[in-house]
Image (cartoon, helix red, strand yellow):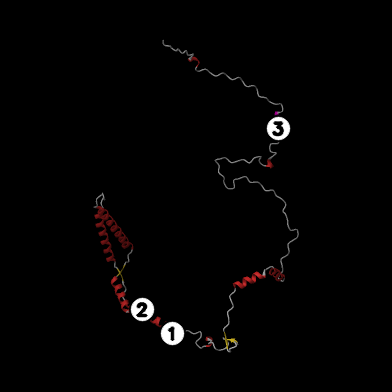
Amino acid sequence: MSVINIYHHNENIYNVEKKPPERPPKPPLYHSRFEHQVRRETKSSKDAHRTMGFAKIPLQKPDEFLKKNCGIRFRATKSAPVRLCTSHKPPVPKKDELVASQQQVMKCVDFKVENIKKVVCSNPKKVRPRYADTRKGDFHDLEKSGLVPVYMCQPKYGKVPEYLHRRKKDLEAQKQRLMDKMAEQKSACAAISQEERLELLKGLKKNWENLQREYQSLPLLIDTVPKMIRKAKLEKGLKELEKDILMMENNPYIYVYSDDDEQQQQQQQHNNRK
C-alpha cells in the first residue's frame, strides 16, 4: 500500500507587495527655558582660550606628506637677558701695556714641552773638521790651518769655463750649417693649380657615379656572405669618395707632398751620420 504525501501551502500572491507599517510621529523636542541664556554666555566667552593655543594639535591627513617648514611653530616667550658679568669689560690695552700682556701669555706656555719638541725637530750639529798635530791629541781647526784649498781665492772663481764657451760656439756653427742645408734643399710640398684640382674633382665624381651605378645594381635580397662583403666594400668606397670630393670642393688651395723627396732626405741624413 503506497502513502501519498500531500503538502498544503498557504500562499497568497496578493500579500507579496505588502507595505511596512508606518512609524509613529516623533514627540516634540525638549527646549529648556535657559536655552537663550546659555547661547548668549557661550558666544560671549567663545574666544577666551585664544592665547592658550589649541587644546589638541591638529594632525595632518593621511594623504598629505610632510613638507619642510610646514609644521606648527610655537612662539618663544621673551624673557629678560641674563647678564653673567655685572661689571664693565676692561679697556683696550695701550701700546706700552701690550708687552706686559704678552709676557703674561708667555708664562702660560709649558716650556718643558716646547723645548722637547724643539730638540726633537732640530738637526744635529755638524762636527767641525779638525786635525791632530801630536800623538797626545792636540786638535786644531782644519779650515783655518791653510791645509785645505780655498777655491774662493783662485783667479778663475766665479767665471765660465773655457770648454763651455767652445761648446757654445760649436752648437751655433752646427745650427748655422743645418739652416744653410735646409735652405738649399727644395720644398717637398707643391701646390696644385686650379685646372688640376678641377680635373681631379671631375675624376672623383666620375668614379663615384660608377660605384653608385654598381651599388644600385645589387640584388634586393642580400642572403649570402659574398653579397654582404661586396655591399660593404661598395659602401666603404662611396664614403671615401664622398669625403675626398667634399675636401676638394671646400679647399681651393691644395698642396701635394712627394714621398720621393722625403726618402732622399732620410737617405742623405743617414749618410751624414755614417
Q: Amino acid at mark 1?
A: Tyr
- Badge 2 is on which residue? 178
Which residue is at 25% across, 57% downward?
Answer: 211
The rendered magenta stretch, by its main secondary structure, is classed as helix
Query: Which residue range is magenta in the image?
Result: 35-43
Q: Are marks 2 and 1 in contact (CB under 8 Å)?
A: no
Horizontal side of residue 83 vs 241, given as left or right:
right
Badge nearest the viewer, 3 or 1: 1
- Badge 1 is on which residue? 163
Which residue is at 36% across, 80% downward?
Answer: 177
Q: Could you say whether the residue bearing mark 3 is in a helix, strand or loop?
A: helix
| Whole-percent x, y for residue 126 in the image | 58, 79
Badge nearest the viewer, 2 or 1: 1
- Name the image quarter holding the N terminus: top left
Sooner in the amino-acid sequence: mark 2 or mark 1: 1
**Rounded to the nearest whole Å, what is the CA distance between mark 3 and mark 2?**
118 Å
Q: Amino acid at mark 3?
A: Arg
